[in-house]
Amino acid sequence: MAKAPGVCFYFGTFNPIHNGHLMVAQSALSQFGQRLGFERVVFVPAGNPPHRYQEPDLLEATLRLEMVRRATADNAAFAVSDVEIGRPGKSYTVDTLQALTQQYALPQPVPLIIGADALAQLATWRQPQRLVEMVHFLQAPRPGFDLVRQINLNGELAPLGTSPIDMPPLGISSSWIRQTLATSPTGAEGLRYYLPAPVLQFIRWNGLYT
């Protein structure tokens, strides 16, 4: 069994990964790494996300994985897991997290980075009660969303183990980037400061999202 002291997970579709994701990950590491005992943030691109699989502009998982690898390659504190890539069926966070917890021999609760907008929808995820028990949520602020401290499970309010990441709410989103790539006359050139340079180059080379 692999041993990896100090791991925090960052699940996401990353369609595509952008500089906002990297800012959130670095802020979480700087603010909570020593306190919660992790030295590395592991990005986990979704394989077949149940909430997103019907999106017409969802890239295949191998392309999204490659962009995450390119975006994080210059930071030794960032790693990437391909555990969900190629797995048949839909990818559920609770199943993947259970497998990763065993792989890295991690005690629970496991630190996991999530946006406040996504956390507000946790009750709609697979086995939300189990996730509440397994995870300490490092919550990134999002415009228009308050800090989520509890969720409604079967008519009862369940308190969350959570800590807010201290940073400005970021309005940048992958959906806005995809829309801009598809509709803007300048295309990728207009996003040079929103996307990591290797990701921008990969999108150009492969004509993605156009």
Image (cartoon, rainbow, N blue to C red):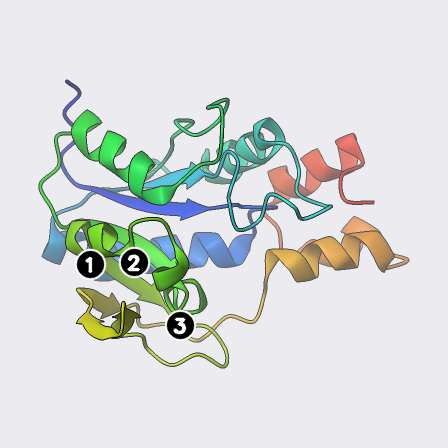
Residue linked to disc 1: 32
Residue type highlighted by circle 3: Pro
Structural crowding at the residue carrying mark 2, measured as other residues with C-alpha within 10 Å and reported as few (<14), some (14–19) or many (≥20): many
Residue situated in front as seen by the camera: 14 or 48: 48
The numbered dot on residue 141 is 3
Of badges 2 and 3, the one in the foreground is 3
Structural crowding at the residue carrying mark 3, measured as other residues with C-alpha within 10 Å and reported as few (<14), some (14–19) or many (≥20): many
Q: Are marks 3 and 1 in contact (CB under 8 Å)?
A: no
Q: Residue at x 83, y 45 (%)?
A: 210
How much space separates mark 2 and mark 3, taking CA atoms? Answer: 12 Å
Q: Quarter of the image holding residue 171? A: bottom right
Q: Quarter of the image holding residue 44? A: top left
Q: Position of residue 194 (x, y in %)?
A: 62, 57
Residue type highlighted by circle 1: Phe
Q: Secondary structure at mark 1?
A: helix
**Residue 94 appears left or right of 170:** left
